[in-house]
Image: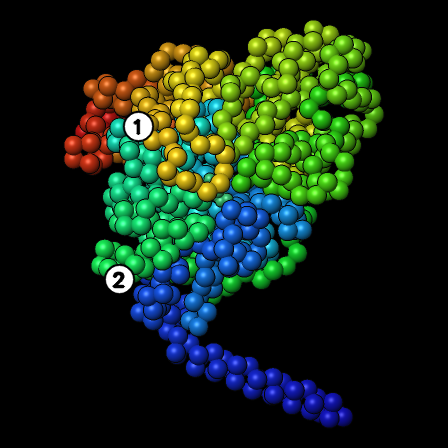
Amino acid sequence: MLHDMLRPRILLSFFAAIVILAGAGALLAQNADRPWMNPKLSPEERAELVLKQLTLDEKLALLHGNGMAHNPSWEMPLTHLANGGAGYVEGVERLGIPPLVMSDAAYGVRSSGANGRYSTALPSNLAAASSWDTQAACAYGELIGSELRAQGFDMTLGGGTNLTRDPRNGRTFEYAGEDPLLAGTMVGNRIKCEQAQHVVGDIKHYAVNDQETGRFFVNAIISRRAMQESDLLAFHIAIAIANPGAVMCSYNRINGDYGCENSYTLRDVLKKDWGFKGFVVSDWGGTHSTEKASAAGLDQEQPMDAFFGPKLKQAVEAGRVPLAEIDDHARRVLYAEFLSGLVDDPPQTSVVDAEKGLKVARQVEEKSIVLLKNSHAVLPIDPARVHSIALIGGHADVGMISGGGSAQVDPPGGNAILPPGKGATQWQEHIWFPTSPLKALRAKLPKTKIDFDSGTDLDAAAKLAGGADLAIVFVYQWESEGMDLPGLSLPDQQDALIERVAAANPNTIVVLETGTAVTMPWLDKVAGVVEAWYAGSAGHKALANVLVGKVNPSGKLAMTFPKSEADLPRPVIAALPAQAEGNGRGPVNAGTLATSYAVHYDEGPEVGYKWYEAQHKQPLFAFGYGLSYTSYAYSDLSVDAAAKTVRFTVKNTGERAGTETAEVYARLPQGADESFKRLAGWAQVALAPGESKTVTVAIDPRVLQVFDEASERWKLVPGDYGVFVGASSDNTPLTGSLTVQ
Ligand code: BGC
């Protein structure tokens, strides 16, 4: 009986096995014709095997884009295949090589709204860098990678690594701060984990693209040594960690040559010195020549084929561009496809896991929020003492602001401060996410009376604040690609709002939603300041958790907050010459560019805290600064010069559990003529109240070296290096030295 019942199943299994075997056989037969499909071969070997099969036209097709979706001036015949994204590069279907379908994805997958899709907005990149947490960076990349794939994309355009030389740069929120080790490490870990989702990883905008004013033509003038020890070092560290398939060259010129035809940065440094094997993709409209760009190391023009289409073919046929150069470009694109796993596992569209996204976005923001001031422990909010709260300004009843430009992620339901159903968001529109701090706080503090005032009428705001136990003022500063900020003051008379509220209530807390530093003329008059950055899709919940003490803040500034613009290396960003083209986005007409416009980075490697230290200027808040609801003490430094490690003890001297980021800095020996410290490493130490831990931090050797321009080599300066350990760049209670023979 049992036997009879089993018979059909056995037969079924038998047929299934035959089908599977036949399938595997067919695959084997197919793969016998396609040896590059063998995943056991290295990406290099696989790329080489494919390259041998390609016709010239197939190679050339890998080297340019085919238009940009939703951009009429960059429309091409194949634009419709771009999946609503920024770029599309044909694959080689007959050989199983998928096309590249690219989307911007700085803090989430871009402009999903225009395509009817949903994406998670993570906190800004600057926020995430302020977590100093490489696992958070990894979770950040993993999430974006998975959402890109779910939406049918296989290449990311994220990974902004430019250093914050000028805090007014409109893209500061897209970057990871002012220090090469921190920025490189955070971006590197993010892109490593993003690419692990089988999307081609990208790191941008290479290089010295440190202001948006005149971005299509500005000539960044900087010595090779300074560039190597600052901006390029950040990229090198990020690229070494992430091993990205692509690097995007920048719009600007670097010492005369455009970023996308600069043989020093592309060919000599990136490809030769660093051994980068992926491809260089131009920023959108950032290609200016055919032969020069190709020889300098540009591999792929985006988003069109103005220079790397028919013109490149003609140049090859006329012998002006050697075939070997074309092979090198094509090999690199193929390598990136194999390296990222995209060939073996092309994207499968599916529904984005919104729940997971919100969880990751909240967790990252909880680690990124920086507590800047907390007089008489005004925070966390204690509901036993605080019975009423006046919530004021910043549209805090409906949402929180986000960063604009090609980074923009669209909020579900549209801009939270506009009536619903307004449609897709527009370029240069200030976009609020529907993440209401008012609702989130009410949920956390059900017994506390929380009232909201928009802050537009200062008298009304002061009146509400005066009658409450606590006032929280929400202020914002909007930033975007294609513009720089006129200054670091809060816009829209928000300074005046804070002054009035603080005058009405000594228990005033300011919550900042900013993409960069702001000046704080009211700092002495308020009790607390919390930097929430552009907080992402779950920013309100993370913020509420910090305000009520469910989460103990641990973020530390990834950039200096100066006292005023007068303290910056360039107090004013040089104005554009009158003949310059619009500074926004669009196809670049090289003929009308202002070629004379330059920015002189005379401060060289003294970026951010290094500048303030060298210039003896006290910032408002130093790089690496951030408070906690507990306190920490540092002791017992020992330095192992041979191993280049430092050991020290951190103790939680307060009453709450917390995580301290302990920072290690090094100063070059006397003779090196350098009057600032360099971040050399850090450790994150989770401590229960009263607990101590001894940690060992390896000093990253790259930050101990200097770049010798004459020999074009890195060198260690012999002598005694100063070692400094503590809670921020301007608070290093432990000092020691490390001798290099
Ligand atoms: C931006 C890039 C972006 C590209 C595609 C450019 O204008 O500078 O960061 O990836 O456009 O949207």
Where is residue 178, by image quadrant? top left
Residue that badge 2 annotates? 317
Question: Could you tell whether 248 is left or right of 127 in the image?
Answer: left
- Quadrant (top left/top right/bottom left/bottom right) for the C terminus: top left
Can you give x and y, in whole percent of width and height, for residue 664 in the image?
39, 27
Disc 2 packing (10 Å; few <14; some 14–19; many ≥20): few
Residue that badge 1 annotates? 221
Q: Is residue 687 above or below residue 560?
A: below
Q: Is residue 1 above or below residue 379?
A: below
Q: At label 2, which amino acid type do we have?
A: Glu
Q: Residue at x 43, y 44 (%)?
A: 285
Where is residue 238, by image quadrant? top left
Q: Is residue 414 above or below residue 677?
A: below
The reply to whether residue 369 is visible in this rendering is no
Between 543 and 310, the one nearer to me in the picture: 310
Answer yes or no: disc 2 within 8 Å of ligand 1: no
Q: Residue at x 21, y 28 (%)?
A: 717
Circle 1/circle 2 CB separation < 8 Å? no
Identify the element where label 1 is drawn. strand
